Structure formats: structure tokens, C-alpha cells
Image: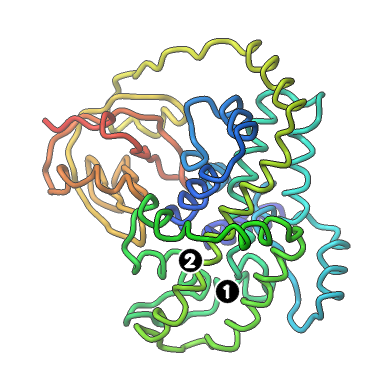
Amino acid sequence: MKKRVLSVLAVALALVLVSWGFVGHQAVGIIAEKHLTPEASKGVKLLLGSDSLKDVANWADDIIDEKTFPQHFINVPLGLSRGQFDDEITNQPQDNVYKAIQAKQVIIKNPGSSFEEKQQALKFLVHFVGDLHQPFHVSRKEDQGGNTIMLKFDGRDVNLHSLWDSRLISKQGLSSAQMSEKLDTASATQIKQWQADDLKTWLWESYQLSTRLYDECKPGTELGEEFYQSHIGIVNERVEKAGIRLAGLLNVLFTPKLVKALEKKASAQPAAAPVTYTPIEIADAAKHIGETVSITTEVAGIKELDGITLIDLGAAQPNTPLTMVFRGDARAFAGPIKTIGTKLTIHGKVADRRGKPQIEITKPAQLIKL
């Protein structure tokens, strides 16, 4: 039975509830940072150090596991009135994004929580606020947030969840910086209203949208340019609202008293150790999960997905011992090495992605073309 439960979980995780894709989440972080008060900006800096909200916006997806998986969404039956909806999300016994956002704020404010706990809570908050603004993170359990509803978009197979997050944003063709610049246009009146709305209202908006989209996107529906043109504005507004509201939440959270307490905790943190890279053979990558390594090898395979470039090293799929991952804006770094047979040295931390070793490339300095 335990093996069966783990198998079901693996399938669920494989569906990847990644709202807004990598670029969209980063755009939420960029927009939020532009609307922080000086006090909130200081608090964020104390907890994240050299990282920005953009840098940590996808962290919660990178470390997703059995415990944190339910915190990215909330399952709600269709057909509820606003009052019924509020009762439903308030009284659900299981973990969900509504509970998680409140819990992470408590951790950050709690004098007894450690610096690391506060730091991780902030990273979760950045991501979860983005998540709940994606309509299919507030939707039905029976189709796993639209993941099992198959459609065609621009002639390609896609599930409803993926269409609404990464596929529409990918078609827009903007980097996270370009997207945030385009979207960050709310008036002072809009900002005041969006930030005044409570957490239940944020979720209610997504619920209303997912209800509408279930009607528009039945299984097997073929969608294209007309759908894109009529819906990309909705996507963009949800991303913009997420950024503005994240800023509002952090502006309230980081009071002068809390920031002063964080200064004391930050000063007591040990200095970060310098990063060193252990030279290894690519065939041994799976033996070095969690370690920072240096590998000299060659490109064996290239695959382009929505918002992600995957480059296999040493051997092509399914036998590759290591895959490089370039997400969002970092895809530009892959350009000089996107030729089979290119020799290079790669530096980075080896991660286990569903049993497959990978290194994510976030800086050009991680690559040396030979």
C-alpha cells in the first residue's frame, strides 16, 4: 500500500503545478520589488541577502515534496456562492495554499523562529502568492487543476493547466524583465484597491476565472490565436495583481519592530563559506547529488520546452548521465553551446529531478566553452 501511495504522489508531482511558469513567477517578484516600502525592502534584503524576489520566485517548485505539494493550490468544488466559497476554504482540514500563506507570515513574525525558517517562509510566500493568482490553482480536485483535461493549442497537445500558465506566457515571447515592465502599469487607485482586498478575495477571483475557463475549454477543444488574443490580457492582469499584492503583503509584514529583530538575527549568522567545485567525471554525476561540482564533457542532446531549454551532456536521452537546465531569462546563456558535440566545462550544484541528475544554469560564469 505504501508503494502505491508513493506512486500516486509521483504521478501528481509529475503533472507539475507550476503556475505562470518560470518567467511569470519571476515577473511577479520583479513587480513586487518595485512596490516595496523602504522598510519592507530592508527586511527582504536582510533575509535574502544578495538574492532578489525574482531570484527566489521559483524556489518552492524546486524543492517541492510530499509535504509542500498541497500548499501550492486549493481544491474547491464548482458552483459555490461567495459565502459558500469563503466557508469552504476556511474550513478545509487539509493543507492548502490559503493556509500556507497565513502560516508563512506567522513564521516570519514569530520571534522564536530561526533565521533560516524565516528565510524559507519568505521564499514560500513569494511563490504561493503567484500560485493562487493562477486560476487552476483554485479549481477542481477531480481533474487535478486542469492537468488531466487535454486540448490542442496552436496544433500541439497541451493540458488545460499548462495552457493557462506557461504556454500562453511563452507565446507572448517576453523575458521576465520585459514582462514586468509591460505589466507594471497599475494606477495608484488600482494598487490601493488590489492591496486592500483580502486573501479570500484573491482566491475568489481565481475561482471565478477557473469556473469560466472550464466552460470554455472542454476536453479535445482546439484553440489558437483567437483564444490567445482574448485571454493573454487576463493572464497578464493576474501576474500584475500577484506582484502588487505580494508587495502589499510584505509592506504590512515587515514592520520597523520586525526589521530591527531581523537585523539582530542577521548579524548573528555565520559568514557564508566560499563556493568550491569538486572536479568529477560526468558518469559519476548521480553519486554527487547536492554537491557543487565541475565537469568537462560535451553536448549530446538539446530539447526546447515552454520557457525551458534542456541540454543533455555525455549521452542523449534516455541514457544521459546529466542534464543542464536553463529556465526563463537564463535560456540566453545556452545560445553559444547549442550544437551537438560542443565541448565545455560546467560548474554547479547537482540536483535530483525525479531520479535524473541535473544542474541548473543561472549565470553565464557556470559555463566555459572549450
- Considering only order in the chain, which callout, 2 or 1, is on the residue closer to the N terminus? 1
What is the quadrant of the C terminus in the image? top left
Task: Identify the residue at image location x=39%, y=24%.
Answer: 292
Q: Would residue 210 be found to the left or right of residue 273 on screen?
A: right
Distance from label 1 to label 2 (Cα)?
19 Å
The image position of residue 257, as x and y in percent, is 77, 25
Where, by quadrant of the figure, is residue 80 drawn?
bottom right
Of the pair 62 and 123, the residue shown nearer to us: 123
Mark 1 and 2 residues: CB-CB less than 8 Å, in contact?
A: no
Colour basis: rainbow
Q: Quadrant of the N terminus?
A: bottom right
* Between 355 and 204, the one nearer to me in the picture: 204
| Residue at the image position 34 percent from the left and 24 percent from the top | 293
Dot 2 surroundings within 10 Å: few (below 14), some, or many (20 or more)? many
Q: Is residue 356 above or below residue 134?
A: above
Task: Identify which residue, 37 or 296, lies in the foreground.
Answer: 37
Number of marks drawn: 2
Q: Where residue 367 is drawn, which disc sits there?
A: none
Q: Residue at the location (19% across, 30% down)?
A: 368
Q: Is residue 29 above or below residue 42?
A: below
Picture coordinates of residue 83, whole percent (x, y): 86, 75
Q: Looking at this view, name the residue that lies furthest to the front.
A: 188
Q: Is residue 8 visible?
A: no
Q: Secondary structure at mark 2?
A: helix
Q: Secondary structure at mark 1?
A: loop
Tell whether 143 sits left or right of 21: right
Q: Residues within 10 Å of mark 1 (few under 14, many from 20)?
A: many
Decide which of 11, 59 is in the foreground and name it.
Answer: 59
Residue 146's tag is: 1
